[in-house]
Image: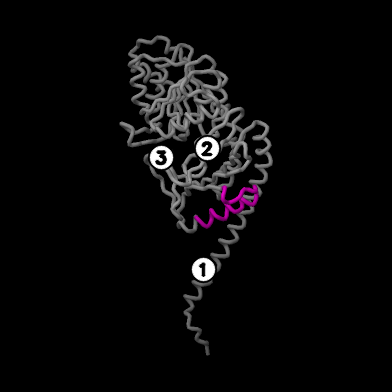
Amino acid sequence: MKKDTGFSSRETNKGQVREFSEIKAAEKLYEQKTYFKNRLLKKNRHLSKWAARNSYGAYRVYNRDIPEIPLSVDIYTDFPSGIRYAVVFLYERPYKTSGSEEERWLESMLAILSDTLSIPEDNIFSRIRKKQRGNNQYGKIVDTGSEKTVRPDNEKTPDDFEITVKEGELGFIVRPQTYLDTGLFIDHRILRNRICFESKGKKILNLFCYTGSFSVFGAHGGGVVTSVDISNTYLGWAKKNFELNGINSLSHEFIREDVFLFLKKALEKKEKWDIIILDPPTFSNSKKMKDFLDINRHWPLLCAECILLLNRGGTLYFSTNSKKLKFSGNLLQEKINRLAKGKDHSLQELKIKDITASTIPEDFKDSKIHKVWEIKL
């Protein structure tokens, strides 16, 4: 006679399936942790030496190398204390997991990172990098337990703190804890150096200047820089970066304005620059703007207006992180012709060159982190 255990065969089967599923999940996590550790060790062995040789206080040590581990890991070394920090982004996955599952998985990866690179867990800051929606491009992150929310950048929090990171001869203020982006886009080191090399005696315009890293390099190289951004917070941060490097911010111009409006006014005044840097966010609908920005739609207008503001022999550097943007020289020329109304014959000599490959640094090799075009008049 079959003994009555109090459990149906269906319940027993469910329990066995659940147990089997948990075992497989544990095995998968162990495998991912092992892969992640080995990859970190291998890349950091090379990149830490490379960064030290070039006096780079910040570098990316892991960049979604393994599809099942969609993280990026940036290492920041404070100068002069030598204390190291890590900023980790978990990129939004194509499949859904519960918030608690995602959090437990991320905690496991951060523990491996801490142990492998000897960075205290208190010095590791993580956030989820979602597809940009709305005006969250440069918002502040607030830790609210299992959730991270973004709030306006003019609010202060008690945990705001700054470190100084070196890039060659220059230093930059980085805030690794409270901002979605830290204040320094490290993938643009090569282009910043190029600006510095070309800037002596030049009049430079830096649009969507953010915290002014391009502006600092331009001023350091001997240029006079106009920096434009819609955020007072970031313009203030840019001025602090100038002063940090012994550059008198009063000798340069910082303008808080919607870039679309600034360009319209500059064209009306017939102002001119020798170098223009156009590195906008992919999308923004900040309340401070009259309209929204969608770089995939608005790049021809922005680039055309910038070209009309160039001196003869001048250069526009146009950069984007958008993977969808389709650049067309013919489309740009058509937009310029409509804006210029045939008055500027020098625009027929426009020289356009995709310089993306030469601007990707060692720690972003094989990635599609940005695209850059050099447009000469």
- Quarter of image, res 208: top left
Sequence-first disc among 3 and 2: 3
Q: Label 1 neighbourhood size at 10 Å, few (<14), some (14-19), many (20+)? A: few
Which residue is depicted at the point 52% across and 45% down?
Answer: 89
Q: Is residue 80 magenta?
A: no
Whether label 1 touches label 3, CB < 8 Å: no
- Quarter of image, res 53: top right
Image coords of residue 149 (percent x, y) = 41, 48
Nearest to viewer (mark 1 / mark 3): 3
Image coords of residue 16 (percent x, y) = 53, 71
Mark 2: amino acid: Val
Q: Which residues are magenta?
A: 103-123
Sequence-first disc among 1 and 2: 1
Looking at the image, which is closer to me, 119 or 281?
119
Reading the image, the residue beneath label 1 is 18
Colour setup of the view:
one colour
Which residue is depicted at the point 38% across and 41% down?
Answer: 152
Nearest to viewer (mark 1 / mark 2): 2
Vertical placement of residue 283 versus 36, above or below: above
Sequence-first disc among 1 and 3: 1
Reading the image, the residue beneath label 3 is 153
Q: CA distance from mark 1 to mark 2?
A: 46 Å
> What numbered label is drawn on residue 174?
2
Q: Label 3 neighbourhood size at 10 Å, few (<14), some (14-19), many (20+)? A: some
Q: Secondary structure at mark 1?
A: helix
Label count reads 3
